[in-house]
Image (cartoon, coloured by chain):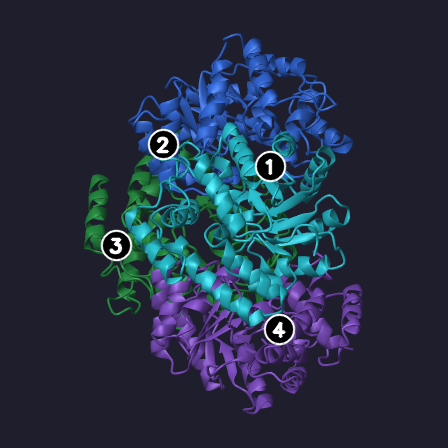
Chain colours: A cyan, B purple, C green, D blue
Amino acid sequence: MPQFSGVIPPVVTPRHADGSIDTNSLKNVTKHLLDGGVSGLFVLGSSAEVPYMTDAERGLVVSTIAEANAGSVPLIVGANEQTTNRVIEEAKKVIDLGADAIVVTSMYYAIGNVAETETHFRAVHAAVDKPIFAYDVPVRTHFKLPVDLLVRLGRDGVITGVKDSSGDDVGFRQLLLATKDNPELSIFTGHEVVVDGALLGGAHGVVPGLGNVDPAGYRRLFDAAQAGDWAGASREQDRLADVFEIVFTPNGRVSGGAAGLGAFKTALQVMGVIESNTMSVPMPALNDSETAAIKVILERNGLV
Amino acid sequence: MPQFSGVIPPVVTPRHADGSIDTNSLKNVTKHLLDGGVSGLFVLGSSAEVPYMTDAERGLVVSTIAEANAGSVPLIVGANEQTTNRVIEEAKKVIDLGADAIVVTSMYYAIGNVAETETHFRAVHAAVDKPIFAYDVPVRTHFKLPVDLLVRLGRDGVITGVKDSSGDDVGFRQLLLATKDNPELSIFTGHEVVVDGALLGGAHGVVPGLGNVDPAGYRRLFDAAQAGDWAGASREQDRLADVFEIVFTPNGRVSGGAAGLGAFKTALQVMGVIESNTMSVPMPALNDSETAAIKVILERNGLV
Amino acid sequence: MPQFSGVIPPVVTPRHADGSIDTNSLKNVTKHLLDGGVSGLFVLGSSAEVPYMTDAERGLVVSTIAEANAGSVPLIVGANEQTTNRVIEEAKKVIDLGADAIVVTSMYYAIGNVAETETHFRAVHAAVDKPIFAYDVPVRTHFKLPVDLLVRLGRDGVITGVKDSSGDDVGFRQLLLATKDNPELSIFTGHEVVVDGALLGGAHGVVPGLGNVDPAGYRRLFDAAQAGDWAGASREQDRLADVFEIVFTPNGRVSGGAAGLGAFKTALQVMGVIESNTMSVPMPALNDSETAAIKVILERNGLV
Amino acid sequence: MPQFSGVIPPVVTPRHADGSIDTNSLKNVTKHLLDGGVSGLFVLGSSAEVPYMTDAERGLVVSTIAEANAGSVPLIVGANEQTTNRVIEEAKKVIDLGADAIVVTSMYYAIGNVAETETHFRAVHAAVDKPIFAYDVPVRTHFKLPVDLLVRLGRDGVITGVKDSSGDDVGFRQLLLATKDNPELSIFTGHEVVVDGALLGGAHGVVPGLGNVDPAGYRRLFDAAQAGDWAGASREQDRLADVFEIVFTPNGRVSGGAAGLGAFKTALQVMGVIESNTMSVPMPALNDSETAAIKVILERNGLV
């Protein structure tokens, strides 16, 4: 296994009902994840609502998690900005606050191409002295990172890993195959319900938003896969896929962003880990009936 | 296992150099597939270049395969047309020619919605007396069949199975979970390189275009999975993923359609199964250097 | 002005309540359009619900319109099929039935590229002896015809005109500029509410679905533009844009296809031109409250 | 005419060859635009490469333009950030630096919906005390602002105007029609080559990136339209469309972003207005042969 592997959930960002960051709840989430057996924390990811945070809030979140983690596991922290020079400034800030590695997407809002994207990653690598994960999330950036670019960046030591949230399972398998001879590269899947197949294909880790709710379940799935117990891994995956049904409770009432992240926060509130399921402006929180539906799903899966 | 399961390749359509259908080569392909241990034949699929065939050619292809198959395995045949009434007419034709089941996509060129799509499938079911597979191929139809629609159509007996070429692995797992209590429904994946994961998640079969080239490989993969030998299944999948590299040899020189289907036909030509790698108008055939590159890949995988 | 110009509406296809083609109503629509001063008829277009028609229905529609038209104006007829050889077969059929020119889209369901698309148009041109209009409708074909391809096909005499329904007004202006030196080429817009601007930019004609409802309005708009009365053209366009509000009356209740075409047919029913607003399977017809809303819009524009 | 109208180019951002902001050249561009007769300056727009600028660079650009403008015309300044609270912080900064109005897009990277987008605009309006332009640029944000939302925000005084770069000419005309009774609302088009048609339809202004190169041409076009000389407006538009050909000189060599903005900067360099055509990291500058091709286009249009 490469340096980074295992279950590395993207930590959600609890807010008080008035919208301010709830640092106590954030510490509780961090402890909940560490207790669940995670091997790293993915900080300031999409699940953290990072695009909705002000600069001050981003700093507060990183330092709060760093304090609660106290060096237990590596912190892989998003440097989420539109373009290269902005990413570099953001990366330096989060490294100062304790990041062990940074996460970089392709540019967005900007309209780039493959060559500019390669320059982008190489320029960030040249400017910072921590390992870089390429985060492939075309549903947000509207640019798919090509497999051959990722292979090249990995071979040249520009990136230390890939978090794949592309929804392109064929490309993911090709990436795994094309990097089998690179023992330093960590390939993570960000998709909650196909982790067993991803691990069977050779993935080194998983960054599941749902891991906020059930970190121990993902740890069991990962351990089963490591032990070669694939039937057990598949059973655990099926159970987690049922837990994942919480994200569909709003059934179109709110945006896709508010539904998924809102469900994770609402579940954590029902479980008593965080105080409020308040979302970042302008996203509404899930309501009472959605909360009740989520409770039913959590109960049938033994999580409350 | 439901009625339909296993390895069911979408049979390619060989053409002579002058563009006419090469029925002898088509019989050879059919024999090659049956010898490889397939459990069904998927006829007039996208891999058959069905949208490029005239009505007369479609009839000739179905009757030629039916004759060569001689009842050995079920024929699942595409009724590929833009909308409901045209699909029904096409379905009746292919059933007369020997189809054991038909394959129906959502409408295309037409701009529909979920309700019209449901009416579409129900109307086809009401008009024909053979089992129907829903073929989910949004890269061609530009309409993703929703999981809940497929679950509903399966529960009501409108469809007997699903061929998923959606590229949406999350939706595929949800479909598998949501139909676990329906023992009659066959869920197939159409993606060549993630079959091990699909079977681990509970899929009943696979419809791999690459299965034209290496049907025995897919049969070994399927058998390993059936036997619970997941590590073996994954090794076979990795080998097949390497064979799949043949589709990337044109590297942008031709369209995506001409590259993938052209690679399958070129491989079969190299292997001596078919006479020519000629494509349907207006697609160009792969050239000599691409053929040479494909031969290298086939050789390193023991296929020539 | 080139050979084809002016107002050339895409004729809708009336159906009886039982779904069969209503040839009497179709003759009435044809007469209504000729009385409105149109300079051509666009037959078997998207507004005719052509993808929903069986082969027999397509033939019946062309021959019925040809009979009602009796040579008054040119018939520009769609040869709507997935790929080249199927288009050629369809083109020959409609030419036998009276087409003065045919309309060809890029391929669909098939996944092509620019080179294949060029081969496609050139092959159709080589096989038929009537003028060809390229129909650019990426919302249906999911392939935008590039400006430079259209310019090249026009210069080489492969196409005699373009019907643009691409929604790309910038590309449309570039096409007009790039073909200014080609007096034979007819550039038509298919967009109902920006005809004044298209004509100001140099377009030669318009193919408005809404022209079924108000052919005389489009004729007045075209005549004002020809006379250099641009303020008058703009006023008529604004009035027609208000009539176009009929297509929004379903407000999401039905698919985009059923809403737009359904509104045209419902308006014609309200106006007494056709018997029923029945749609092709599987599209629902507009309902009573939508019909009432359409009547209000027609009344305030003096159309009933 | 409402408060804001006329020709309001989005000012480009010159950089020295070493990548730093070239404030002298930026002052020259500002003077060039004022001399050309513009009625406002659009600052920190996409044409300014705003997503590529650091926070410090954004501040420097606004204050430099404000100083060079010295109150001559209104400054409409982009507050370009991913989500609501970040936009509000950015808006306050640019207002402190001299913005007379701010420009706000829908959220990006974030995945929102119509309701969240409405909350977004209303929250920004509540937090800042300057007029707001909604900037509709789905090619960057991947979210089209619906016409009815814009009408509602305009009617409620949340926005004072719209800059449309949506490429949806039908929606643009509907917006013009639906807001005809709102004399305070300014509707601008951002598309360089269809300004004559937009003005004929009732638009109040234009924000052309190409206006950096030829502000006087756009002023003549606007004045001709104001005077009802539509044939003159169309001729000037055709000339400007030919100047716009400069953006196609790279012909795929660089990204779409680098081609368009690079062409404007290269033209200004050829014209002696700015020192260098250097682009923001990671975009390459246009090369010598592209520069030569641009010079030819400028010469045949009398711009050098």
| Residue type, numbered disc 2 | Asp
Which chain letter goes with mark 3? C
Q: Position of residue B301 (x, y in %)?
A: 76, 73
Quadrant of res A85: top right
Disc 1 marks which amino acid? Answer: Ala
The nearer-to-camera label among 1 and 3 is: 1
Residue picked out by circle 1:
A79
Which residue corresponds to mark 4? Answer: B230
Tell me the crowding category of disc 1: few under 14, some 14 to 19, or many 20 or more residues within 10 angstroms, Cα based. many
Label 4, residues with CA under 10 Å away: few <14, some 14-19, many ≥20: many
Q: Which residue type carries mark 3?
A: Thr
Query: Answer yes or no: do the residues labelled 1 and 3 have beta carbons within 8 Å?
Result: no
Using the numbered discs, state the Cα–Cα distance from disc 1 to disc 2 in whole angstroms.
26 Å
Vertical comparison of D64 with C20: above or below = above
Task: Report the Cα–Cα distance between label 2 and label 4.
Answer: 51 Å
- Which residue is identified by label 3? C266
Give the number of the disc on residue A18.
2
Q: Secondary structure at mark 1?
A: loop
**Residue sticking out furthest to the top:** D70
How far, Cα to Cα, is label 3 from label 4? Answer: 59 Å
Is the residue under label 2 in contact with that under label 3 (CB below 8 Å)?
no
- Which comes before the other along the chain, label 1 or label 2? 2
D251 left or right of A20 in image: right
Residue C67 locus on image (x, y percent): 35, 64
Q: Callout 2: residue from which chain?
A: A
Please state which of the two labelled residues, at mark 1 or mark 2, is closer to the viewer.
2
Both marks 1 and 3 on one chain? no
D78 shown above or below A264: above
Label 4, label 1: how far apart the Cα atoms are: 38 Å
Marks 2,4: beta carbons within 8 A: no
| On-image quarter of the N terminus of chain D | top left
